[in-house]
Image (cartoon, grey):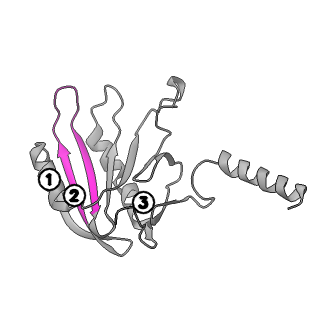
Amino acid sequence: MPVARRSLLLVLALVLAACGRGGADGSVAWRDLTLELPDGWTVFEEGQTLLSIANVPLGGDVSEEERPSGDVVAMFLTHRRGVTPGEWRRQIEDSGATLEVDEAIEVGGVPATRLQFLTPASEGAAETRELVVIVPAREVEVLAQPVPLPGSTDAPEVFDRARDTFDGVLASVRWGAPVETPGS
């Protein structure tokens, strides 16, 4: 390959890396799915079994000056073998949370279950509202939740303001061929 072409490819790769995770159109591919990031959202953690996205930069490398203010929400997509809605229902009940929504939906044309729950305030933690969507056929669970800042007490309201955005991310999911995992 000519040096000029190789240099051009290297520059292009550096530009793409500097733009952050996600396609130019805001799409993110993870495992066997592609989703659209809402405007301003970013990927802050990605691995073989986890994809974490949020409306502000989160994670260990955010400096004190970059700490977010205002509503902070995140979604965590996890690949977990054998995940079931029943398991989540038991976990919600055992935690003392109130199950507010339990419904069958589709995510990218694949059957799923949506569970929305309200967790009461406890020692050191404020009341919060969360959403989990379980897609058993793809062994994926999606947790959508507010990320309360220190001293905040409005997590359920933050969740309610972000609900349409969470639903938009779920509506954007497109599935590809299932990922083969070792030992399957």
Q: Position of residue 129 (x, y in %)?
A: 24, 45
Q: Nearer the viewer, residue 107 or 146?
A: 107
The residue lying toward the viewer, choosing from 91 and 127, is: 91
Mark 1 in CB contact with mark 2 (< 8 angstroms): yes
Where is mark 2, residue-wise? 115
Q: Indicate which disc, 3 or 2, sits on the residue closer to the N terminus.
A: 2
Magenta stretch, residue numbers: 113-134
Q: Residues within 10 Å of mark 1 (few under 14, many from 20)?
A: some
The tag on residue 99 is 1
Q: Which mark is residue 169?
A: 3
Q: What whole-number distance in Å separates the C-alpha atoms at marks 3 and 1?
A: 22 Å
Q: Is residue 113 above or below residue 67?
A: below
Q: Looking at the rendering, in which quadrant would you find the C terminus?
A: bottom left
Task: Label 3: state its secondary structure.
Answer: helix
Q: Is residue 7 magenta?
A: no
The kind of residue on which mark 2 rests is Leu
Give the Cα distance between marks 3 and 2.
Answer: 16 Å
Q: Left or right: where does residue 86 sit relative to residue 35?
A: left
